[in-house]
Each structure stands twice: as C-alpha cells, then as structure tokens.
Amino acid sequence: MLILFEECKHKKNNMSKVSFEELLDAGAHFGHLKRKWNPNMAPYIFMERNGIHVIDLYKTQAKIEEAANAIKQIAKSGKKILFVATKKQAQEIVEEKVKPTGMPYMVHRWPGGMLTNFATIRKAVRKMSTLEKMMNNPETMKNVAKRERLQIQREKDKLEIQFGSIADLNKIPAALFIVDINKEHIAVKEAKKLNIPTFAIADTNVNPNLVDFPIPANDDASKSISLIVGIMTKAIEEGLMERKAEKEDRIQREKIAKAKKAEEQKAEANKEEVKKEEKTEDK
C-alpha cells in the first residue's frame, strides 16, 4: 500500500506531529467500500482500489494538526472536552487514554439529552454520589435490609457505569471529540443545537460537514483510533501544562510586584520619617 502513496508523498512535507508512516502503519488510510461512501468525503479520498476507498493521509495529517492545536487551546483555557466513543473497538482505548487527562468521556450508551437536558443528567450524577456516600456509611446502612441494600448497590453500579466518567463535569463541555459521526449522530445533533464545537474522526461513509474539525481517517481500526485519540490527549496534556506554567508564572510575578510595592512603601515611609526629623531639628 505504501507504493500507492508515493506520488502523493513527494508533493508535500510533513505537516503535523504524526508522521505519514505512523498513519499508514495504523491503517488510517483504509476507508469503506466505494458503494458505502458519502460524496462529501470526496476531497479527502486519494484513490479507489479493489472497490475500497483510500484516504489521503496528507490531508489527515493537516486536519490532525488543526484539531490538536484547537483542542490544546481549549484545554489551556481550563475548559472541558467530552470524548464520545461508544463503539466496541474504541471504548477501552478512549477510557485508557482520556482518563489520565482528567477530561470527561462517554464510552457506553449516549443518554438522550446529555447536552440539551444537562440538568437532568446532573441529577442522575448527584444521585450516584448520594448512593455511594450511603453505601460507604456503616451507620446509615446497618438498619437497611439485605434486599434493599442489594437494590441500592445495583442502582449505584448502573449509574456508575453510565455516568461515572462524567462525575466531574459540572457544566456543559466546551467541545466534543467523537470517534464515529454516524454512530454518535445524536451527540452531534445535540452539540450542533447548542453551538458546541465538534471534533471527529471521519471515515469515508460519513458527512464531514456535520462537525467543525473532521479528521479523515479509519474510524473502525483500533490502531487508527488509538493513534489519533493519543495525539489529541497529548495536545490536552500540553495545554494543561502550559496553563499550569502560566499560572505559576503569574503567581510569581504577583509576589515580586507585591514585594516591590512593599519596598517602595517602606522607602516612602522612611523618607517621611527623615522629613519629620529634619523639621524637628530646624525648630
């Protein structure tokens, strides 16, 4: 397959942090069957081979760089990016890579109204927290019957599976990163309704115009998903590090300014004291 891209490969230089070879090894170039394609993906298709569309990986590189830069700035501003990936091959990957960043993620069924009816979702999260506190309090649970205790445990576990990964999401996220636009069409519609920026891996069978930052790539292969999500989480980490560094720098500057002001006030007080002494001597 590398030979297929040689012509395209010599046209441009590397445009992003991810190399052409990395994308190729991950199988990011494999699209769907030609008969399943979405015509809106035409600008991102390099060629068709054996009835399967092949994605132009240089355009993938450019879009990855564009998306990573935007996501980095969102993270740097202290806002949350919600990752959505409920398809089986993406669930574990997204959870593993996103969890360390502290960003929320949804890897089980997308609950209708997750964004458009966020207040109700927050109630479910608070209920989960309340049940957890109840279960961890021996004094509260000692008078609860065994059957009722099991019911509480089941309800808590059910809520934990669905909403545990968004427990710290206190307000609507600043952006969404979606692995499969077609599968997560409800999430895309809700985000669009609320004007929330959307990032997504766009395979050849989807409409990339439905999201703000489409990344043309294979959204079925685990390696492809892992590579792209990994780049996005790295961008988030960089943004958070820069935010932390700027905060520390600001605190340091404030300390220096405060110390300087104190010195100036002390110097001014000393001048006033000297003037008073001079006036006393003149008298």
Image (tube, rainbow, N blue to C red):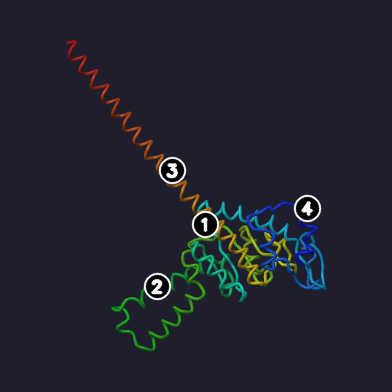
Report helix, strand or loop for mark 3. Answer: helix
User: Mark 2 or 3 closer to N-term?
Assistant: 2
In the rendered image, the vertical position of residue 242 relative to residue 161, given as above or below: above
Task: Count neighbours of disc 4 (C-alpha within 10 A) and say few if under 14, some if 14 to 19, many if 20 or more.
Answer: few
Residue 269, given in percent of the width and then of the height, sits at: 27, 26
Which amino acid type corresponds to the residue marked 3 in the rendered image?
Answer: Arg
The answer for how far apart the CA atoms under marks 2 and 4 are is: 59 Å
Instruction: Give the camera-side residue of 208 and 2.
Output: 2
Mark in front: 1 vs 3: 1
Which amino acid type corresponds to the residue marked 2 in the rendered image?
Answer: Thr
Residue with the mark numbered 3: 250
Residue with the mark numbered 4: 11
In the rendered image, the vertical position of residue 74 relative to residue 156, given as above or below: above
Question: For this view, does 42 lie left or right of residue 248?
Answer: right
In the rendered image, the vertical position of residue 143 relative to residue 65, given as above or below: below
Report helix, strand or loop for mark 4. Answer: loop
Residue with the mark numbered 2: 130
